[in-house]
């Protein structure tokens, strides 16, 4: 998306060549015909629901109820005093602050390590990528076993070492860390392949030039060449990981159901619970808007920041 | 005193031998072009001199210092890359300062803000600034110092890359096809500028190119490389007039040298299509006779052929003629001769015998000399008339 | 990073390999124990030993229980139907639209593209409530339609294909027009065959995303015979298995396997696909 602003501006005149020759009513009709299925489904499945959710947020609509009324900002006012919602926002934030830096940092480190030698490249890349194609619900179950307080291998090791054996997914002080750890495990592979693509795109001659210019250590080369050249990839990965972290749902729903005592309640689960458990569609729609606002804010930061700071064009 | 000496260097990538025992000596301050078709190993040789590639065997020394096992960073060489390899996130000034900062500042002095805190760093940075400005003025890029590479034209980037190379006064200067990304007109003017720059800087220079005309116009000497071997190292004039190998003769010169299959009889007479051409040679059997286009003249006698194509170049005309044996030759003739050169007309092309050369079919140069009596004899008149 | 490193000796490479190996072990740990536990009898699981290799094989017990109690085959089939149903419509709808946006000039094009960009910004979870109401009122809950329909218009596919089509030379299309092709046959006979890399990349991205999705099936599906793999595991956990980790791991392994095996066979394509579509998570 970072490239979008650049390309959409520059390519306009060029594509006119093919277009100009076929302009006229016929082309216009053909163009709309080609787009028709997409437009119809877009309106039905995206645009209309979006408008409805915007409207719902200002109503007290409950699914199954005969009617509803507009209640202005009442839903949003209710959020301020809603302890579950408060926990949900806080937990989503903490989870993201845990997952984002760790999964990016670890992915970058592993990508650089993989690129640094010839041995095992394909193997390690495949291993770290495996979680991306694995069924999250199933893998969450495997983690549940690994982290099981009494029969899990992790606590077996800790017990042998004479350390404490926390109830990783059952204690409110550990549950977010545990979910965060699984989140890092899930996201590293995805970020890693993006970093690897970014690393291979760096011209080899820049490293050669750095060497000629007297740069000796790998550390200095990283800061002179790799880091700045990886800039666009890095900010891109940052935004993607953030939106992925904010949308955490599968692991929470599978492993903790938001518990214990809301200690792992997150935004998407709140939306789901309020709507499909309590049938409070109006309130759930309002939470949805908060969720959407956060995602849009991140996108805005991206377009503002990336295009200005990281593109050297 | 040799600037750069390469002794018997070989390089293999796996089973592929890229360099097969190359030796080259570049005198102090000399400009040597390394020229050859792509894939001949010239870039590998340059990267070995730079220290970006290790040798399989052999030695490299720069300014009488053994550098074979030294890293590029420790060799005191500068290099201009084909695509310039400028750091895209740094300004022109910062790009040019990198080699100086890396060499003159200690690790501590390179830390961010050290320049503001450490007096030693501040002094060095001031000196670097002066040096960079000086080099920029030399290249007339001092107006671009705060721009980033993406905001520069190809020619400007090329100058910045040159600037980054000359700023620290290296003992060896390496250029890897530095003009290949410029458009044709800019390439010609930049040639002259690089030569002028080399005269001012005076460092031993190795210049890699696949373009023989670049090598011819710029160099003190040319090293022609093919299939991992240096075939000939000599001045442009020598390479052009006196190639030791048929491959060198073919590679140098535009249009390419004419090659005519010939035969040396048991009495040593060189014959084309069974007719003596006025040369004798100690060799025997089938050979290749070569002659530059400008050494073929239109006359009433000589090699018989028919006009196939005529190219008008302004100061001269290139005449493409098909010989009796089916070979195509090109002669550079005066524009005034153009009138008689209708397509399909028979012509006779006379050789300047002192310029003709003989090569074995295995490419080595063979001796030959004009025979006085043959030149006078009307050997080919019948062929022309018939 | 520099080239000489690529050929360094094994001993010099050891620290790198050790670090990567450690990370790889952590990445693989859930898989290793998933396989191991799926073969262990319950008694061994509860002994909390660290042994990966079971003393006693309980393959038949665990896998038998899963296959007997859970229609794993149905889940996988549902997953396939949903993923391919979604993919076919996505390509069918997105390719012509993307072609029109990339190569035809018509009034309103920029506005349409603006809507595509808007769609890119909106996570699908945002529209879940109205869609649910829609499917509920039309009686389409608990149908394949409800599982597939919300995703048939992929703005991301339109965006991706448009970017790709723009890079195709105009002359290719002009040549096809001169050869007498209409715009519709150009789309399917000239553009799509040339868009194969983008289409493969998008297909992988789409299948991975929908195979793994839990949120939407959870919203619209109640009936067990429409469960997708993710739903199936979730239901098996809460209803049947409880703390029976042997059977649970066996079930998890069975539903994870198809995509993982596909990945192992076509790693390069998968990784390229995800990198190329990395724009959206």
Image: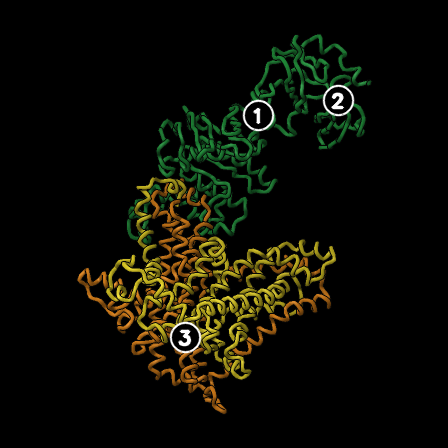
Chain colours: A orange, B green, C yellow
Task: Tell me which residue sits at (69%, 62%) in the image.
Answer: C183
Structural crowding at the residue carrying mark 2, measured as other residues with C-alpha within 10 Å and reported as few (<14), some (14–19) or many (≥20): some
Structural crowding at the residue carrying mark 1, measured as other residues with C-alpha within 10 Å and reported as few (<14), some (14–19) or many (≥20): many
Q: Chain under label 3?
A: A
**Local secondary structure at mark 2:** loop
Task: Tell me which residue sits at (40%, 80%) in the image.
Answer: A273
What percent of the width, then of the height, locates residue C274? 47, 59
Relative to B285, residue A113 above or below: below
What percent of the width, then of the height, locates residue C273? 50, 57
Q: Which mark is residue B248?
A: 1
Q: Chain under label 1?
A: B
User: Rounded to the nearest whole Å, what is the CA distance between mark 2 and mark 1?
Assistant: 26 Å
Relative to B327, residue B90 above or below: below
**Local secondary structure at mark 3:** helix
User: Rounded to the nearest whole Å, what is the CA distance between mark 1 and mark 3?
Assistant: 73 Å
Residue at the left extreme of this rendering: A162
Q: Nearer the viewer, residue B294 or A94?
A: A94
User: Rounded to the nearest whole Å, what is the CA distance between mark 2 and mark 3?
Assistant: 87 Å
Tags 2 and 3 on a common chain: no
């Amino acid at each position: 998306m970072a490239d979008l602003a650049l390309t959409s501006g520059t390519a306009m005149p060029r594509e006119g060549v093919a277009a100009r020759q076929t302009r006229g009513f016929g082309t216009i009709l053909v163009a709309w015909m080609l787009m028709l299925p997409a437009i119809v489904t877009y309106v039905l499945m995206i645009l209309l629901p979006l408008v409805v959710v915007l409207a719902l947020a200002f109503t007290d609509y409950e699914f199954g109820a005969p009617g509803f009324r507009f209640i202005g900002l009442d839903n949003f006012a209710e959020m301020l005093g809603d302890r579950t919602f408060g926990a949900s926002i806080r937990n989503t934030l903490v989870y993201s602050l845990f997952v984002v830096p760790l999964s990016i940092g670890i992915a970058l480190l592993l990508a650089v390590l993989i690129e640094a030698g010839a041995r095992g490249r394909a193997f390690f890349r495949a291993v770290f990528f495996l979680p991306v194609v694995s069924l999250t619900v199933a893998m969450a179950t495997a983690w549940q076993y690994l982290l099981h307080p009494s029969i899990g291998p992790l606590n077996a090791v800790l017990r042998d070492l004479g350390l404490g054996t926390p109830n990783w997914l059952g204690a409110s002080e550990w549950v977010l860390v545990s979910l965060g750890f699984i989140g890092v495990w899930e996201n590293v592979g995805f970020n890693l392949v993006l970093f690897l693509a970014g690393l291979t795109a760096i011209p080899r001659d820049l490293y050669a030039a750095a060497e000629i210019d007297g740069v000796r250590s790998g550390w200095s080369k990283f800061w002179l060449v790799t880091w700045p050249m990886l800039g666009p990839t890095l900010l891109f990965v940052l935004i993607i990981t953030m939106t992925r972290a904010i949308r955490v749902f599968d692991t929470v729903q599978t492993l903790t159901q938001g518990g214990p005592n809301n200690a792992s309640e997150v935004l998407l689960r709140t939306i789901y619970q309020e709507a499909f458990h309590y049938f409070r569609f109006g309130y759930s729609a309002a939470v949805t808007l908060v969720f959407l606002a956060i995602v849009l804010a991140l996108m805005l930061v991206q377009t503002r920041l990336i295009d200005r700071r990281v593109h050297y064009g | 005193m040799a600037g750069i000496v390469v002794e018997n260097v070989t390089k293999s990538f796996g089973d592929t031998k890229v360099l097969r025992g190359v030796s080259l000596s570049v005198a102090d301050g000399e400009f040597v072009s390394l020229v050859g078709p792509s894939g001949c190993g010239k870039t590998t040789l340059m990267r070995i001199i730079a220290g970006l590639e290790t040798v399989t065997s052999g030695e490299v020394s720069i300014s009488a210092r053994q550098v074979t096992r030294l890293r590029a960073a420790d060799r005191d060489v500068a290099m201009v890359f084909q695509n310039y390899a400028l750091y895209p996130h740094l300004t022109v000034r910062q790009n040019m300062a990198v080699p100086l900062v890396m060499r003159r500042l200690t690790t501590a002095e390179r830390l961010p803000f050290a320049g503001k805190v450490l007096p030693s760093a501040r002094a060095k940075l001031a000196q670097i600034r002066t040096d960079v400005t000086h080099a920029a003025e030399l290249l007339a890029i001092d107006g671009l110092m705060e721009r980033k590479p993406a905001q520069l034209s190809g020619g400007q980037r090329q100058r910045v890359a040159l600037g980054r190379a000359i700023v620290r006064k290296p003992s060896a200067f390496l250029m890897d096809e530095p003009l290949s990304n410029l458009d044709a007109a800019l390439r010609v003017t930049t040639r002259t500028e690089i030569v002028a720059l080399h005269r001012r800087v005076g460092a031993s220079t190795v210049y890699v190119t696949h373009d023989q005309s670049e090598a011819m116009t710029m160099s003190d000497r040319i090293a022609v490389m093919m299939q991992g071997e240096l075939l000939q190292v000599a001045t442009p004039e020598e390479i052009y007039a006196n190639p030791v190998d048929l491959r060198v003769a073919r590679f140098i010169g535009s249009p390419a040298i004419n090659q005519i299959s010939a035969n040396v009889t048991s009495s040593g007479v060189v014959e084309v299509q069974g007719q003596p051409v006025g040369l004798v040679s100690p060799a025997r059997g089938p050979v290749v006779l070569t002659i530059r286009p400008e050494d073929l003249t239109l006359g009433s006698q000589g090699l018989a052929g028919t006009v196939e194509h005529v190219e008008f170049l302004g100061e001269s005309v290139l005449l493409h003629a098909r010989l009796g044996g089916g070979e195509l030759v090109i002669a550079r003739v005066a524009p005034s001769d153009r009138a008689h050169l209708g397509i399909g007309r028979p012509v006779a092309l006379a050789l300047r015998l002192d310029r003709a050369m003989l090569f074995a079919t295995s490419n080595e140069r063979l001796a030959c000399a004009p025979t006085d009596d043959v030149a006078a004899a009307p050997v080919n008149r019948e062929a022309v008339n018939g | 990073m520099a080239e000489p490193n690529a050929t360094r000796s094994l001993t010099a490479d050891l620290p790198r390999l050790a670090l990567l190996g450690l990370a790889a072990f952590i990445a693989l740990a859930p898989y290793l124990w998933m396989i191991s536990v799926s073969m262990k009898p319950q008694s061994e699981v509860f002994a909390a030993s660290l042994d990966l290799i079971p003393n006693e094989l309980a393959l038949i017990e665990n896998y038998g229980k899963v296959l007997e109690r859970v229609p794993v085959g149905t889940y996988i089939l549902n997953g396939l139907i949903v993923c391919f149903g979604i993919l076919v419509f996505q390509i069918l709808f997105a390719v012509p639209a993307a072609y029109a946006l990339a190569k035809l000039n018509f009034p309103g094009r920029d506005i349409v593209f603006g809507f595509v960009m808007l769609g890119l910004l909106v996570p699908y979870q945002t529209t879940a409530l109205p869609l649910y109401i829609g499917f509920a009122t039309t009686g389409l809950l608990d149908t394949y339609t409800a599982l597939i329909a919300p995703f048939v218009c992929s703005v991301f596919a339109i965006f991706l294909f448009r970017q790709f089509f723009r890079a195709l030379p105009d002359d290719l299309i002009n040549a096809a027009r001169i050869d007498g092709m209409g715009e519709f046959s150009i789309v399917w006979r000239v553009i799509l065959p040339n868009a194969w890399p983008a289409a493969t990349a998008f297909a992988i991205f789409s299948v991975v995303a929908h195979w793994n999705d839990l949120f939407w099936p959870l919203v619209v599906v109640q009936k067990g015979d429409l469960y997708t793999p993710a739903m199936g595991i979730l239901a098996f956990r809460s209803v049947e298995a409880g703390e029976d980790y042997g059977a649970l791991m066996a079930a998890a392994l069975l539903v994870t396997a198809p995509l993982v095996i596909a990945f192992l066979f076509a790693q390069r394509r998968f990784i390229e696909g995800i990198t190329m579509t990395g724009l959206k998570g």
